[in-house]
Image (cartoon, rainbow, N blue to C red):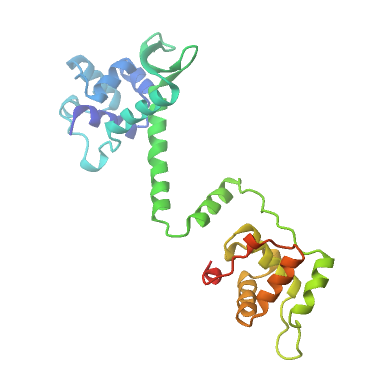
Amino acid sequence: MTYGRDLRALRKRRGLTLREFGRLCGISGDELARYERGEKSPRQENTRKIADALGEPILAIRNGLVWTEDEKETRPEALREGILELMRETFGGLEAGTFQDSLGRIESCYIAGVPPDTFTVYEEDLETLAESIKASAISLAEHMKDVRPEEDIQRELLEGLGTLPPEEDAPGLTDQQWQAIQDLLPPENTGRGRAYKDNRLVLEGILYWMRTGTAWKKLPERYGRFRCVRDRLRLWNETGLWPKVLARMLALNIISEHEIVVDSTTFRK
């Protein structure tokens, strides 16, 4: 295990930022960042300061013996470099810079963007971005393992964000249109068994499905259970009733020919 990686792991285990760590040991954050990136090794004097700040024996700090295998820093250096490259591409530029902290010490930072629209990126910002990316990766991995249809996943995500678009409106039947069609449909109550669901409501649910292209299980609740609506269409189609209803609705300009979608896959959507 490298000195820099181990040093970063122990600092983070103590919950210290580079700036806080620097104040404790009297070494600039820029210098500590170079140690952690493996760009240089600390002198013996600075090693002693780091050991004192962390409360560890100097030999343990120097030899990297204080960290166990499961406490090693898990964030690869490639992640940090990837963040820097992404910021460079997104904002048009990224240059190394320095700033003076409240104690007058010179710290390292980055200047992102193109003048005059630039802003400063501190080491703490990079650490926060790295942690955010790792947390997001877990959520993304769970999403990738989800075998549900993509539209269901998207709807759930939108609901969670509170950005679900309003339910698409599809006009129902006017009273005049319904009066011109209802004689084709069977009675809702034959006097035997359970009464059929309201024919007009079912027909309007079918029309909604035809006009919006939505999946059956996404049929709005105002039309009742989607299985009832879908199964009624199946029944009407199998008994030869549905072609007559379609012909009547076409004649009344309730629907157009391009909206007729009943085929062998209709009842599986």
Query: Residue 162 at what x, y percent from top left?
Result: 61, 46
**In the displayed structure, would residue 15 be above or below residue 190?**
above
Query: Residue 247 at what x, y percent from top left?
Result: 70, 71
Residue 256, picture quadrant = bottom right
**In the displayed structure, would residue 215 be above or below residue 158?**
below
Instruction: Give the residue at x 22% y 24%.
Output: 38
Q: Is residue 209 left or right of residue 74?
A: right
Of all residues, the one furthest to the bottom in this rendering is: 192
Which one is in front, 111 or 184?
Answer: 184
Q: Is residue 50 left or right of residue 256?
A: left
Query: Residue 217 at what x, y percent from top left?
Result: 58, 65
**In the displayed structure, would residue 130 be above or below residue 172?**
above
Instruction: Give the residue at x 66% y 75%.
Output: 242
Badge count:
0
**In the displayed structure, would residue 50 be above or below residue 6?**
above
Query: Residue 40 at what x, y percent from top left?
Result: 20, 19
Of all residues, the one furthest to the top in this rendering is: 104
Which one is in front, 69 or 117?
Answer: 117
In the rendered image, which quarter contains the N terminus? top left
Which one is in front, 59 or 97?
Answer: 97
Residue 173, picture quadrant = bottom right
- Whether residue 202 is visible here, answered yes or no, is no
- Whether residue 113 is visible here, answered yes or no, is yes
Residue 187, picture quadrant = bottom right
Which one is in front, 170 or 157?
Answer: 170
Instruction: Give the residue at x 44% y 12%.
Output: 102
